[in-house]
Image (cartoon, rainbow, N blue to C red):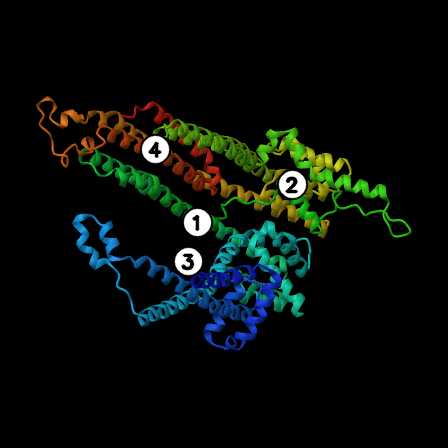
Amino acid sequence: MIPLGRFGVIVLGGLVVVALVVGSRIERTNRQLNRVALQLFGSYVDNDTPRQVRREGLVQSARLGVTYRVYAAKTLLYASLCVMAGSLLGIAAIGFVFDLLAVPEATLRSELPGQLQFLAGQLAFPDPTPAQVIAVFVVGGVVSGVGTGGLVYLYRWYRPRQIADKREAAIDESLPRTVAFMFALSRSGMTHKKLVEITGQNSDYFGETAEELVVSLRDMQFSNADFLNATRRLAQTTPSTEFANFAENLSDVLRTGRPMSEYFREEYEKYRDDRKTRQQQVLEELAALAEGYVALLVAGPLFLITILVIIGLLFGGTLDPLRVFVYGIIPLTTVGFMSYLGGLTAELGLDSEGGVAEIGAEMLHRGGPSSSSEETPEKTVTDGGVLPTDRANLERIYMYDRLRGVRQTVANPFDAAVRSPLTVLYVSMAIATTYVFVQLYELYSTGTMSITTADDYLIQGALLVLAPFSVAEYISSSRLRRIERALPDFIDRLADRTEAGMGVTRSIRELEPKSVPGLTDLIRQVRRDIEFGAKTSDALVRFASRAESPLAARAVVLIVNAVHASDDVAPVLRIAADEAQTDRRLERRRRQELIIYVLIIYISFFVFIGIVAALVLVFIPALPSGSELTGGASGQSVPSTGLGAGLTGTSGQRQTGAYATVMLHSTIIQGAVSGFTAGKLSQGDLLSGAKHATLMIAIAYLALLLLPVPS
């Protein structure tokens, strides 16, 4: 039983922590905390020191949504409350320690082996005096309180720097394509402010750079600043050095009256060249990482496993370290490698982009082109009410839209699976979990549960999860690659026609769908939408929604906004075509550079399986049997600590089976981690490695079934 006083201390300290965590997430409570923090600590954070200036810049760069004064005062409030909570919980913890140490000498003597009972007197904790107890509680409470408060204080000031660094990487990655978008729109004659507004509205497709431009619009809205001063202040508060240079140069262009399109053209060409150079640098680093992965995380583990198995079978004592290495160290080191690899691929923008499936609805709700999907105004009568039939019709339409996804899934489950591979993953996970649970329960109920009987069902469950998802993901990604390979040709053909004097609508109508393989069906649907009376901009929005491609989304956003801004869209289409061609060339080069390292990973995996098979088929059977090591009929025994100890221990011949099982399991684990690493390395997406992992696990499982495991 916990003493009542100690229980109260724990509850009080826990309430303080819960209040801070929950209160910061509730808007009304958060505002109250802000007021209390300013009243208590507002005067302490107004010092104009270099540290304060530096921290104020970090808070602004992180875009935390609060002023520096509020954030700094709140940090002091949190730290002060955590000092109190840490002291209370520290005192409670010290009480528990006293309870654990307060073991009588007689109890220790009875629990210790006979040879160690003489240590009972030394191990028994002496009864402290009241003064010593008070001193320990006071010192422990102060140390734990100050330590907790200090950690919270340091974390609160580390968080803005972490967010700012993350935003800097995201801004640098998205800046080239955002500049290309602004350059294209500037050719249509847009005003400076309108150009920034449209870019900010499409931040879903142009990343953190577009979000950063929104800051200047808010500055103009709430501070009554003009566009020039807002741009200058943006250059001072952004976390990205590249974007700061861009904003400073933009403010100079605004001040001097230089043509905006000329400046954006220069920046566009500069970033395009820089992007090629940066991709080459990242590809070289990826190549080095791939070679390091094969050397350290494929060949290295194979070497250590071989050494541990040989030493263990000859001398014994390495089975537990081998298990720790195979089941723990190999997966954890691979996770760490892929985490670092994810940061590197994010710099190049290789991580998969999402959020394009609903592009049509998002654009339309942001005030893009009109569409029949917009809400139909209710018909009113003279008394201000709504006709009942109209209300009923609107409710039917609402329910029809809500159930559209379910109906499409039921009508065409294959198409639904291809368009949403994650749904297949969730369903297969549920099925596989049920299957594995039933099989393991049967083994447990019959008393035959062991690692050698359960591993089959665990591996089968993993394959049941990965195989359907791999098929769906491969078909989906292949479809996306076909669309993105054909998209530059589609935009290029539209640009050629508009440069010849055609309008966008006529260009689409006269474009032969079969002339753009990969987009044939989508182009037919665009033409059908136009023929049925939809606006060209609406038809293009639906085209991007059906394509579900980030590249198509950005191109359509550019074309639609250009159509609304000017009748002359030929320059915009030409820029969009050039940008799409550049993306395609960079993607092709990246795949060509990295495919060789994916093949090396496969070859290394097959070498891994080959060596494990050689150990199981050749080395282990060639070892002397237990009877040979114990002298056979003559009865002469070999010392259990010498050669063959791994075979003649208490488990006898079962040691060879245990080592063989761990080795075969290592092939399964190596196949899984190597497969996902290959996907992350080649396509920048962890899930794209599911097909590689499925194939490698299946091959390793086949080896597990075919290779004889010693009993």
Q: Which quarter of the picture shows residue 593?
A: top left
Q: Which one is closest to the eye, mark 4 or mark 3?
A: 3
Assign a secondary structure to mark 1.
helix
Residue 371: percent from left, percent from top: 74, 44
Circle on res. 665: 4
Sequence-earlier tag: 3 or 1: 3
In space, the residues marked 4 and 1 are separated at their CA atoms by 31 Å
Amino acid type, residue under disc 2 in the picture: Ser
Would you name the residue on which mark 3 appears?
Answer: 2
Local packing at callout 3 (Cα closer than 10 Å; few below 14, some 14-19, many 20+) is: few
> Looking at the image, can residue 430 be seen?
yes
Circle on res. 183: none
Q: In this view, does 210 lie to the left or right of 153?
A: right
- Are discs 3 and 1 less than 8 Å apart at CB? no
Q: Which residue lies furthest to the right in this view?
A: 382
Q: Is residue 643 left or right of residue 200?
A: left
Would you name the residue on which mark 2 appears?
Answer: 545
Assign a secondary structure to mark 4.
helix
Q: Which residue is drawn at 18% across and 25% down?
A: 625
Q: Which quarter of the picture shows residue 24?
A: bottom right
Amino acid type, residue under disc 4 in the picture: His
Amino acid type, residue under disc 3 in the picture: Ile
Assign a secondary structure to mark 2.
helix
